[in-house]
């Protein structure tokens, strides 16, 4: 048995950071209350969005409404407005939607992670119009301007966090926007795919 948290154990060997966090979510959800949903970094893990490893030590959850949240040894609970369409069920667990999760990460983690989350949400199937609408919902919130900038800059062809950050840095340095995933052909066949091409 592997200890997941106080009073919760899982069978098997030591898990990867992401698998351990999924176990931690499963062990914590019964304790957060029926009106709370998994959110932020924890929802990102559930949706398959990239997330910094230093955010995986606790389960993130949001409870609709005002007031103060709380931080405990395993749970980081925030209180915030949630619309009904911003809550979905993934693997039997209520979590913030893909777009709300990307928005929350962008507001919380800075521009690099805002672009990473926006790129990844488009790559996972979100439409740009939906991403822009989600950004519009948080206009005026702390970090809302960053969310909109990332939504406008997002590109689903960026295939990894490093490509997203590299693209952002190239933009900051004044380089023209590259073509992403450019196919290099010779004699009519693809011989290479370049992440960036000018």
Image: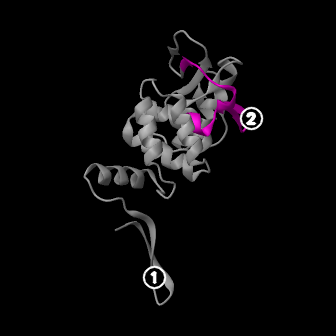
Residue range in magenta is 77-101
How far apart are the two marked residues, 1 and 2, measured between alpha carbons? 45 Å
Name which quarter of the figure residue 21 lies in: top right
The disc at residue 76 is none
Image quarter hosting the C terminus: bottom left
Q: Are marks 1 and 2 in contact (CB under 8 Å)?
A: no
Side of 14 where 174 appears, left or right: left
Whether 47 is drawn above or below 138: the answer is below
Name which quarter of the figure residue 43 lies in: top right
**Front-most of residues 28 and 12:** 28
- Residue at the location (56% across, 53% down)? 123
How many tags in the picture? 2
Q: Residues within 10 Å of mark 2 (few under 14, many from 20)?
A: few
> What residue is shown with label 2?
92
Q: Position of residue 111 (x, y in %)?
A: 38, 39
Q: Secondary structure at mark 2?
A: loop
* Residue 28 shows in the view: no
Whether 138 is drawn above or below 119: the answer is above
Q: Secondary structure at mark 1?
A: strand
Disc with the residue nearer the chain's start (1 vs 2): 2
15 is within the stretch colored magenta: no
> What residue is shown with label 1?
185
**Front-most of residues 182 and 28:** 182
Q: Position of residue 47 (x, y in %)?
A: 61, 42
């Amino acid at each position: 048995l592997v200890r997941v948290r106080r009073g919760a154990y899982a069978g098997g060997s030591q898990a990867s950071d992401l698998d351990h966090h999924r176990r931690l979510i499963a062990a914590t959800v019964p304790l957060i209350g029926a009106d709370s949903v998994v959110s932020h970094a924890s929802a990102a893990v559930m949706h398959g969005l990239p997330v910094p490893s230093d955010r995986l030590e606790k389960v993130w959850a949001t409870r609709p409404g005002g007031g103060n949240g709380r931080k405990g040894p395993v749970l980081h609970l925030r209180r915030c407005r949630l619309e009904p369409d911003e809550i979905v069920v993934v693997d039997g667990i209520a979590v913030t939607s893909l777009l709300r999760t990307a928005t929350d990460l962008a507001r919380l983690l800075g521009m690099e992670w805002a672009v990473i989350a926006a790129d990844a949400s488009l790559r996972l199937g979100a439409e740009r119009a939906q991403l822009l609408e989600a950004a519009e919902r948080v206009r005026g919130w702390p970090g809302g301007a960053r969310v909109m900038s990332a939504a406008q800059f997002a590109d689903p062809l960026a295939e990894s966090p490093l490509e997203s950050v590299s693209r952002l840095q190239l933009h900051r340095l004044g380089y023209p926007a590259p073509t992403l995933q450019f196919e290099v052909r010779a004699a009519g066949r693809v011989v290479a795919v370049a992440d960036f091409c000018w």
